[in-house]
Image (tube, coloured by chain):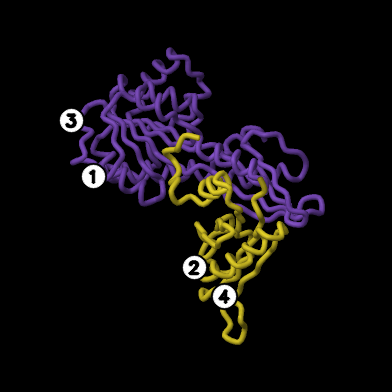
Amino acid sequence: MEASAYIDEARDPLIIAEGWVKDGREVALATVVETWGSAPRPVGSHLVIDAEGNFQGSVSGGCVEGAVVTEAIDVIETGKAKMLEFGVADETAWRVGLSCGGRIKVYVERLDS
Amino acid sequence: MDIKILEKLNAERRARRAAIVVTDMDEGGARLVRQGDPVDGELATAVARVLRTGKSELVQVEGRTLFLNAHLPNPRLVVIGAVHISQALAPMARIAGYPVEIIDPRSAFATPERFPEIMLHAEWPQDVLERQPLDSYTALAAVTHDPKVDDMPLKAALDAGCFYIGALGSRKTHARRVERLLAMGATPQQIERIHSPIGIDIGAASPAEIAVAVLAEVVRAFRSRGLEAKEAAA
């Protein structure tokens, strides 16, 4: 496929994911499907992750990517999609959160070839 | 998601065509809906809305939770004419999120000194548009005042269905332009889509003020696209 003048191919997570799969890597796709309050990335934003934990793109401002990557590696192994939810960071909870006070739902699925 | 869906989606995105990925949140599995693809039932309303607004969303359709992820090409603005108005319009439009390309075969006008950091083509429009065709996510503003330069891209913009087409010139100038476009094979309905005099009416006088008026008209056209057709059908 010829590179497009209209897409920043080096940084575009969906283009990168397609290339990873072509290279024989196992890949998961994470997508923001719902947000409440102030959320750093809009609905539809993507993070792509491979089985080694390499990732590109974003689903937040860096707040929850670590947790999404961990879950994504599990999704790659099992092939079973997951819905993750992240809310306000709470010091009493072990879960990572969003310091901006919003909540987001992230759908994580495996890319099947 | 099947990799084939992603491959098809990326092909659409590379070609600057709109597409939606519809994912079943309960059962998994996705399908690609391209602009113009037939869609049945309740989903059709949601698809049309998402294509218009560009906002991805979760929807309930016939008892299923579906995620519609909109992949719309970025809007862009092609300006025919490297003139004084364009010098103000290009940076303003870029800030507003409409990347600008300027085409003007007169190399004395199309210089990097006059247009720092703007994509410039010191060529005839037909040569540039052959390489980079216009599309429905492109706005075109023709501001050279010269029929030799403006007419061809205006006709091309009508044929490509650009979401905005504007042409600088008085009513008298435009009347003569309409005659020429008719002779080139444009239909009267097509020609009605051309905004001329160009720009919303804010009493703009200076080149920079005219640029503000043009940019406002471009934004209005982009945010209301699809509504014209709906109103005409109603």
Q: Looking at the image, which is closer to me, B28 or B99?
A: B28
Q: Colour of chain B?
A: purple
Answer left or right for B183 relative to B57.
Answer: left
Q: Are marks 4 and 2 in contact (CB under 8 Å)?
A: no
Asked whether the beta carbons under mark 2 and mark 1 sit within 8 Å of each other, the answer is: no
For the residues carrying marks 3 and 4, which lies nearer the camera in this image? 4
Mark 3 touching mark 4, by CB under 8 A?
A: no
- Chain bearing tag 3 is B
Quadrant for residue B4, please give it: top right
Mark 4 highlights which residue? A97
Looking at the image, is A66 positioned above or below residue B176? below
Residue B21 visible somewhere in the drawing: yes
SS at badge 2 = loop
Instruction: Give the number of the disc on residue B208.
Output: none
- The hue of chain A in the figure is yellow
* CA separation in Å, label 4 and label 2: 10 Å
Tag 4, which chain?
Answer: A
- Which amino acid is tagged 4? Gly
Residue B162 in picture, x, y percent from top left: 48, 32
Query: Of callouts 4 and 2, which one flags the residue occurring earlier in the amino acid sequence?
Result: 2
Residue behind mark 2: A62
Residue at 37 percent of width and 35 percent of height: B78
Amino acid type at mark 3: Ala
